[in-house]
Image (cartoon, rainbow, N blue to C red):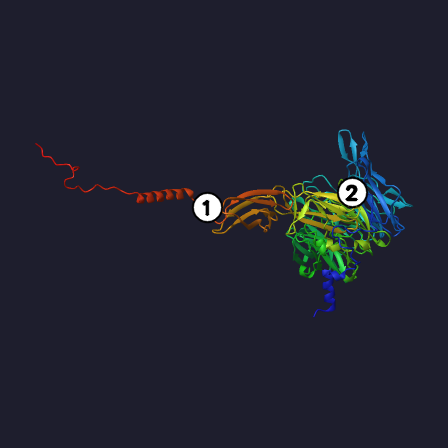
Amino acid sequence: MLGPMLVATVLALLVVAGAAVLVPAPIAAAGAVPDEPGVVMLPEVPTYQAVAVDLDGDGAREVVRLVAGDRGSILVEAWREAAGAWEMALRPIEVTPRRPAVGQGDVVYAGTPARLIVRRVEGVDRVTLVRQPRFQEPDLERECCLLLHDLVLHDASLGLRPVADPSDSVGAVTALDLDGDGTDELLVTGSMASLPDIGFPSEARVYRWDGVAFGAPVVTVLRISFGDTPFVLGDSDGVPGVEAGVISRAAGLTVLYRVSLAEDDALRIEDADLFVTDALAVPQGDGRGLAYISPSADLTVLSWPAGERPAPLGQLPINEGRILGLVEIHGTPRLLVQEAGSGEVLVLELPELTPPSDGTVARIPSVARFAVSPARPYVGPLPGGGPDGEPAFIVSGWLLPGDGRGPDSAVRIGTLAGAQPIGLVGAGRSWLALLHAPLPFPPLDPAGGRLDVPILQPGSGVSLAPLALASTPEADHGTLDPPLEGAASLPDGAIAVGAEGFVAVVDAPPGSRIHLGAEDPTTLASVRIVPAAGQVRLSLLPPAGDEERLPRRVSLVVTTPAGHGYVASWLVRVYAAPPPLETSVTTPFGSDAVEVRGRSAPYATVRIAGSELTLDAGGHFATRVPLPPWPTEISVVAVDPLGNTASSTLTGVGLFDYRGLPWLPISVMLVAAAAAVLFLRVPRSRPAEPRAGDDAALEEMDPD
């Protein structure tokens, strides 16, 4: 019998349904998506990025977003909760001008990188706007400068304050606490000119916060070819402070390097001598270590003290995948890993790596419906943590807390299909902020990353949902069955449509996104936004195919402002022309009813001599029709489920169908028989025997 602690651990790993904190389910979706009272949809405008941060230091987190302005400009907005409502802090700030200046010595902002980075200063959030305009000269265009400004919110006014002197352009900016003092440094990197022995090394700068601004950076040359994009690795060596990781992709290889802070803010580089695709610092026993995924799809945990070589501790074959992060269950850290093929999330003990059978997070039914759909549920960390600021993850429809409270604190969450969590915001972190981003791009890490030109996402937007509502499960497990026009139901559950397609009438909360088309996640799907009226009429075309009436799948996904997802899916048979009609008639010998057989389109209806027949699944039919013993016409009409009609006329004969006999041989035989009869019945004459004295007898005469 399993002990109580083992049972509790298994429940925690599987995160079963009884572990959720649920509110009553809304009315079943059926033909409409339930309303979502209390949700706030920010004004619809294409959004580049959004972060959650406490700008004014009052303990409540605001939403800051970069949005598209007029004629290519970019604006930054701050939204905050006031008396239970959300309002924008006065007016937005234009951070890239709408028109680039032209002329000698002008700085051009349009079409240049801009992003937001959240960093910690003595345990308090700050958000830094990073921009990198270019310097325009006649006949010469060169990179200009890296600009760093903190956003400041004071008395409902939003402003920008410079926090560093302009410097040369770079490739990436990352915020991380390199020395472990509770305040993040900035690690700024960029590729340098090629060196004969190393290829393209990187110049790294460390910016340290002095309480008011960043001081002059300390520069270190990282002799890592093509390694100008570090990421936050974590504490893997046990020395205070967080390290950065760099995966060099030179010569097609993915080699891991560890970058940590040395004396005088210089950087130390250590080569792991490992080929990796993903890595994260993890606890192992009483110390620290590293978990990584190799190109051969093995997950490995190793010990890697500072200045020493890595030593493997545990290994587990997986189906490729990525490392999501660490979560505590009953006070014990667990590693979350998502397999690429199955999409399963493994919850693994460290450092032994418990087999997946002991630690997969079961998907809730509504998430399972998205296995093949035009939108995918979000799987990954919740930026800024859970309700108490603890590390938290959204996995398979669950919000997993990391404060060690155990499975009774796991919370159901919406599928978040086609959306990315910005974080918990507002007073008491009671609101879930979501960025609805229809394009399948990975979310921007609030800690920083590459400085690329921001990509405009049409149809993107930001919503704010009460956490209690976002934690409500989808009605009817996320099934949607909207009314259809121009379609007919078929007995096998499919629908019949014409070449022009059909219309789905979708009722959903205003601001919901409707994803149409591509079930392949690498292909973009079209997106429609539900207007204030709450209804959209969607014209859906059947998929193209070489063979008519071959069933094909058509799907749409509705994602609501609160992060719920509903899937509508149909098997479609196209009936674009009159149905095929093959017929034949036979007469059983001596029967006054002929047999009519044939074939038409599946699920069509056939009428013969006024009687209606139903076809089998293969489109075959058969019946008997009484006929007289002379040629009589039979009318056969086939009508498919959309009313397309085909007709055929047959001629049958009752009792005995003599029309099919071989009349030529029969005629020859009859003629021969008649001739024989006549020959036998006609009298024949024979010569009479000669009699004596008969004058008619010739006398024999002797010659003279």
Question: Which numbered disc, 1 or 2, marks the residue closer to the eye?
Answer: 1
Location of residue 511 in the rendering, given as x and y in whole percent from the top left corner: 79, 46
Which labelled disc corresponds to residue 658?
Answer: 1
Q: Would residue 699 be found to the left or right of residue 80 on screen?
A: left
Which labelled disc corresponds to residue 48?
Answer: 2
Residue type beneath disc 1? Tyr
Screen quadrant of the C terminus: top left
Q: Residues within 10 Å of mark 1 (few under 14, many from 20)?
A: some
In the image, residue 353 above or below residue 372: below
Q: Would residue 530 be found to the left or right of residue 550 on screen?
A: right
Location of residue 549 in the rendering, given as x and y in whole percent from the top left corner: 61, 45
In the image, residue 296 above or below residue 159: below
Quarter of the rendering containing residue 21: bottom right
**Mark 1 and mark 2: span between their CA atoms?**
82 Å
Q: State the residue in front, 630 or 114.
A: 630
Q: Residues within 10 Å of mark 2 (few under 14, many from 20)?
A: many
Q: Earlier in the sequence, mark 1 or mark 2?
A: 2
Quarter of the rendering containing residue 497: top right
